[in-house]
Amino acid sequence: MTDILLSHDSQLIAATLLGAFHGLNPAMGWLFAVFLAVQRNDARVLFFAIFPIALGQVLGDGVVIIVQTAARFHFPLHFVHLFISSFIILYGLFRLFRYYRHFKWSGGLKVGYGQLILWSFLASSTHGSGLLFAPFILSAKRLTDLIPIWVVHELGMLTSMIIIATLVYYAGMAKFSKYIINFELIWAVLLITVGLILFVMSGDMSGGQMHNH
């Protein structure tokens, strides 16, 4: 695990795959875009909706990532590591047993692109995807190391959203409904797993030679 975290190329690959998985989750917006396109009977609406949704995702992730990054470079690394790993575990357990409810939009499908950004921002910031940046943030030596990782993550998310939304729109939702899996359960388990790994690593740090500079 440590070797993966310290390899920049591996981090880029992991961040891209994580973004792609994040984008496949219907709760993150692509299904909303498909409904809008079907309602208005215009395939262009699908793409017009995807991009503001993706922007909201970037902003939602960004808030969580910036908070973690600020803590990483301003406080002792061991304590930040311990706090973030504990928080991720607790948040994952919360989602696992509570089945966290996303922000509920009351405006139906008659929304503007600005409203799509707001909806996506609220959904993303409460989903916990930004928390899964913790391994990259905690292993970063410089702030600039995180920029390309963030970029490839968001590009991976946007790419997967466009691909799955296009397939569902043209093939029809009925053909894909039987393949829909419980992303929320998987996401909760993933949060808990990452949190536990980081928690164990924080213990190694306290007795090892890793220091915050």
Image (tube, rainbow, N blue to C red):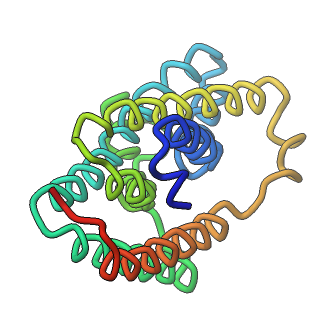
Say which residue appears at 30% left-offset and 80% top-offset.
206
Residue 105 shows up from this direction: no
Say which residue appears at 45% left-offset and 58% top-offset.
132
Q: Please say if 133 is above or below 168.
A: below
Whole-percent x and y of residue 171? 85, 28
Quadrant of the image occupied by residue 81: bottom left
Quadrant of the image occupied by residue 120: top left
Left or right: 141 in relation to 24: left
Whole-percent x and y of residue 28? 53, 47
Work out whether residue 38 or residue 117 is closer to the camera in this orientation and state it: 117
Whole-percent x and y of residue 87? 35, 77
Whole-percent x and y of residue 172? 83, 33
Say which residue appears at 52% left-offset and 34% top-offset.
9
Residue furthest to the left in view is 74
Left or right: 71 in relation to 8: left
Q: Quadrant of the C terminus?
A: bottom left
Q: Please say if 171 is above or below 101.
A: above
Q: Please say if 86 is above or below 111.
A: below
Left or right: 159 in relation to 171: left
Say which residue appears at 40% left-offset and 78% top-offset.
204
Residue 192 shows up from this direction: yes
